[in-house]
């Protein structure tokens, strides 16, 4: 069967009510995650042959605007809120049952990747992989999984987001923006020295709930084109003011050696970018839907959405599948050499298709972790319990607690 025929078959099987624009936006945001980690992350090789994390952003400041494009979590939370409210409205069971179903879909792949890595660690160590490399790998594997924890929390808040959208409409996200602004003022303002460091953690939930709430309000029909224009223009203006007047860090991701970061926890700059991205997405929805009526464009979107959690959970493993064996061969440009030259950038671009190919290969087997669990027999329950223990052990190791 040719690709055109396969795409036509996928297109024909797509329900007429499927919102292709939302799926397209989700796929775009999903692909930005591995692209960002593969482009903006790198390794150095020490004298003992161990890999350590490094970033080209530490050397090339002009790379920072690239992070504005690749940081698309705002879009992901936007479409997540939109899809969640539609699912919530269509539910045929209790709110608790609906929530448990959605959270199980998030949890299964996370449990799978962490349990597999818990088994792989001693095997790799026995094969001669240095302990420092294993710690580096574990950190990279667990790094994207914080998103799942945050997304779980905001998903649990969906009923409250719906109520807030009903009362405040498109302005329902404004209190969240104000909350983050207050915390940022306290931690970066004139009295910053007197503010405890843990205060920044107060931004985690409202910071990421902001775009999700926008999505809920959008799904409830409370944000139209006028509101989208306000989000686009207001978000862009706020972004520029924070960047050039208040001197927020230019990079949307953490840079080694920098005292401030925009992403962990999210700063007001992240919300400004999410607002602008959300406004643009809402305005472009019709054009995106029209583009995705083409079968050859729509088919990859379907595949990406069906493998969403697999891509999120396993893309770092794909990069490590190339880098760890290569570390035994010594310095390979763009893979195990420090990201501090323009040559590294060109070499890393050449490695990107290799990482993508390895991810596709891994996904063929890892996608089974997205499938629903079978009914709870004694043997199945024992396997789940064992997977839970392995996952917890890997988390302890990855977080440096062991």
Image (cartoon, rainbow, N blue to C red):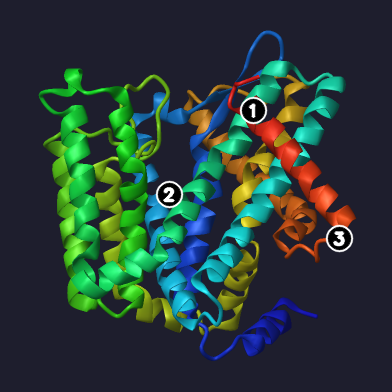
Image quarter where the N terminus lies is: bottom right
At mark 2, the secondary structure is helix
Q: Is residue 277 above or below residue 117?
A: below
Decide: few, some or many residues near mark 3? Use Cα within 10 Å; few <14, some 14-19, many ≥20: few
Direction top: furthest residue? 47
Q: Which mark is residue 168?
A: none
Specify the quadrant of the image occupied by residue 47: top right
Q: Dot 1: few (<14), some (14–19), or many (≥20) neighbours within 10 Å? A: few
Q: In x, y percent, where is residue 366? A: 75, 54
Q: Mark 1 points at which residue?
A: 396
Q: Describe residue 49's horizontal placement relative to residue 313 as left or right.
A: right
Q: Looking at the rendering, which quadrant does residue 371 occupy?
A: bottom right
Q: Which of marks 2 and 3 is nearer the N terminus?
A: 2
Q: Name the residue under label 3.
A: 377
Using the image as rendered, state which of residue 258 and residue 185 is in the foreground.
185
Image location (x, y in percent) of residue 317: 68, 40
Residue 254 image point, x, y percent: 40, 32
Nearest the viewer among 337 and 365 is 365
Front residue of 201/55: it is: 201
Measured in 3D between alpha carbons, the distance from the residue under mark 1 to the one under mark 2, in whole angstroms, is 29 Å
- Residue at the location (80% across, 55% down)? 365
Residue at horizontal 51 percent and vertical 84 percent from the top: 293
Residue 212 shown left or right of residue 249 in the figure: right
Give the residue pinned by disc 2: 70
The furthest residue to the right: 379
Earlier in the chain: of badge 1 and badge 2, it is: 2
């Amino acid at each position: 069967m040719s690709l055109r025929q396969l795409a036509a078959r996928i297109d024909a099987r797509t329900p007429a009510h499927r919102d292709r624009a939302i799926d397209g936006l989700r796929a775009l945001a999903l692909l930005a995650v591995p692209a960002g980690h593969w482009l903006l992350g790198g390794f150095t090789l020490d004298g003992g042959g161990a890999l350590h994390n490094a970033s080209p952003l530490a050397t090339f400041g002009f790379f920072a605007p690239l992070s504005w494009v690749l940081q698309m979590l705002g879009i992901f939370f936007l479409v997540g809120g939109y899809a969640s409210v539609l699912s919530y409205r269509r539910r045929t069971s209790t709110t608790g049952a609906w929530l448990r179903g959605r959270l199980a879909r998030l949890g299964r792949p996370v449990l799978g990747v962490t349990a597999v890595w818990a088994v792989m660690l001693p095997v790799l160590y026995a094969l001669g992989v240095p302990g420092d490399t294993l710690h580096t790998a574990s950190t990279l594997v667990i790094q994207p999984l914080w998103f799942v924890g945050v997304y779980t929390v905001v998903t649990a808040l969906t009923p409250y987001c719906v109520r807030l959208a009903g009362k405040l409409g498109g302005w329902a996200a404004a209190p969240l923006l104000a909350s983050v602004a207050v915390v940022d003022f306290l931690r970066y303002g004139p009295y910053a020295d007197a503010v405890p460091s843990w205060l920044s953690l107060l931004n985690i939930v409202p910071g990421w709930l902001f775009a999700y709430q926008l999505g809920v309000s959008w799904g409830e029909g409370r944000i139209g084109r006028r509101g989208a224009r306000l989000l686009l223009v207001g978000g862009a203006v706020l972004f520029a003011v924070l960047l050039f007047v208040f001197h927020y860090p230019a990079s949307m991701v953490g840079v080694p050696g920098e005292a401030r970061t925009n992403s962990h926890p999210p700063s007001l700059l992240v919300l400004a970018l999410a607002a602008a991205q959300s406004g643009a997405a809402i305005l472009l929805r019709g054009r995106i839907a029209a583009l995705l009526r083409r079968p050859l464009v729509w088919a990859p979107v379907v595949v990406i959405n069906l493998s969403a959690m697999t891509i999120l959970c396993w893309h770092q493993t794909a990069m490590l599948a190339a880098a760890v064996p290569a570390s035994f061969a010594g310095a390979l440009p763009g893979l195990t050499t420090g990201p501090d030259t323009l040559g590294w950038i060109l070499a890393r671009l050449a490695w990107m298709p290799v990482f993508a190919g390895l991810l596709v290969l891994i996904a063929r087997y890892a996608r089974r972790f997205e499938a629903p669990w079978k009914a709870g027999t004694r043997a199945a329950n024992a396997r789940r319990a064992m997977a839970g223990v392995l996952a917890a052990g890997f988390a302890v190791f990855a977080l440096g607690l062991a």
